[in-house]
Every structure is written in C-alpha cells, then in structure tokens.
Image (cartoon, helix red, strand yellow):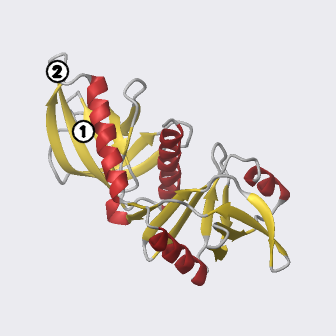
Amino acid sequence: MASPSEQHDLHSSEHEGQLARFTLHSRTEILFLLRAIQKRKLLVNLDLPGSRQIIVTSVLKVNESSHTLILDSARGDALNHELLSGKGAEFVTQLDGVSITFATGPVTLCEYEKLPALRIALPRSIIRLQRREHFRVPMPIANPVRCIVPALSTEDNEPISVHIVDIGCGGVALADTSGRLGNAAGRIMPDCKLLLPETEAIVTTLEVRNSAQIRLQNGAFQTRLGCKFINLPNDMAAKLQRFVMDIERARRNSL
C-alpha cells in the first residue's frame, strides 16, 4: 500500500501530465492565438499574485520583432503601482470558449500611439483549456481542505464534513471516511460549501459522477467521490478560477 506522501507524488505526477497536454510551446501557435485576441479586441484579466485585484485590459499590439506584447494601461495609479511592482501577473482571457492563460513576468510602462500602455514579454508557453478539459489541482494532505455537505436525509440530519482531494473549475474530488455520503453515481447534493483557504466559501450543487473504495494504510476504508459542479454561479466560478490559478502559480514558483 502506498504511503500518503507516495500517493501525493502520484497525484502530482498525474496533474503534471494533464497540464502538459494543454500547454502550447510552438511560437507560431502562440503568436496566432495572441493576434486573434488582439484582432477581436477581447478583454483580458491581469491577475496579480497576492492581491485581490483583477485588472481588465486588452491587447494593443503583438510585437514579434521585439518579443513583446503591448497592453492597454490600467485605470488608476494604485493599480499601475501594483502592476509595476515586479511580481508579474497572470494573463487570462477566453477565445471561442477556450481559456487562454500564462504567467506574464514583470510588467513595464511604455507608450503606444502616444498613449500610456503596458509591456510584457511574449510568453514561451500558453495553457489552453476548453471548459470540459479543466485540470485539477491537488489539495494538501497535511492541512486538509474541507467540504461541508448538508444532511442527506431527515434520519441523518447532521451536515457531513469531507476532505477535498483535488479541485478544478469543472468539479472536485472528495474523500469520505464516514461512509455517510454513500457511493451512488448521479446523486445530486445541493448547497455544498467548499471551505477554501484565504477566500470566501464557495457554495454549489455537486453531482456525483463516479466513486471508488480505497483502503488506507491503517486498514480503514475511504470513499473517493468524483463530483461535477452543477450551475455554478458566475461569481463563485470566478472565485474558484482565481483559487485554482493561485495554487498553480505557487506550484510553479516552487519548482
């Protein structure tokens, strides 16, 4: 039986494999995507690490010769100060229902067509995810993150506390050692509360899509439930996306 640390390593390796499948490294493909974003004048979020601010901008020019991307400047001195802090940002937008994201690195001020603008380096890689392809980020084993599921019956009227194994923008995997959740695929569980660290709780309906019984090292059994978010409200989806990006950014910075 694998130890918890070995299980976590396997989970991390699986996550790395998933992420690699959605990462583009071809300069031609990267330039094509960025020019499509520019041509369509799509709104872009610059998500600042360690900040609750999300700056909305757009791509003004893809400059292949200088290996830079020119963005519309932020509105407000405070936002520009945060952008120019040297911490970099996360570039996030949607192109035909596909999420386009990459870590920007340092942001600098420049001038474009006689107006203030922002300049970043062209990315060497881009993560390109369709909604149905959202990858999952593993949650820490040492400090488990909980999900509170409301009581499933009048006979068993206490809320059920379970651990979150991994999470993505499309769903979540839960670990239940109480046996109270059962393992019925298709079960709908409304008003589940995801107690994610450093953000407000996310309340959503979960649909159980699959389950598995796992024997732990101490001999006890655990039920793993793969769940899909049902009608996740837009504000909750935005919080979840930010949380997933923060976890992924921290993982990349630790490499």
The correct choice, above or below, for 27 with respect to 165 in the image is: below
Residue closest to the eye, 228 or 124: 124
Q: Which residue is mark 2?
A: 220
The correct choice, above or below, for 202 with respect to 99 in the image is: above
Q: Which residue is mark 1?
A: 154
Question: Where does the N terminus fall, quadrant-wise?
Answer: top left
Q: Could you classify mark 1 by the number of other residues whose Cα lies within 10 Å: few (under 14), some (14-19), or many (20 or more)?
A: few
Question: Mark 2: which amino acid?
Answer: Ala
Q: Earlier in the sequence, mark 1 or mark 2?
A: 1
- The CA span between labels 1 and 2 is 27 Å
Tag 2, which secondary structure?
loop
On the image, the x and y values in percent for residue 179 come to 19, 31
Tag 1, which secondary structure?
loop
Residue closest to the eye, 74 or 146: 74
Q: Is residue 157 visible?
A: no
Residue closest to the eye, 79 or 119: 119
Q: Could you classify mark 2 by the number of other residues whose Cα lies within 10 Å: few (under 14), some (14-19), or many (20 or more)?
A: few
Q: Is residue 4 visible?
A: yes
Q: Looking at this rendering, what residue extends furthest in the top direction?
A: 218
On the image, the x and y values in percent for residue 26 come to 44, 67
Question: Mark 1: which amino acid?
Answer: Thr
Q: Looking at this rendering, what residue extends furthest in the front direction?
A: 65
On the image, the x and y values in percent for residue 47 come to 62, 55
Residue displayed at 47% across by 48% down: 244
Residue displayed at 71% across by 56% down: 107
Residue 70 image-quadrant placement: bottom right
Q: How many marks?
A: 2
Residue displayed at 47% across by 57% down: 237
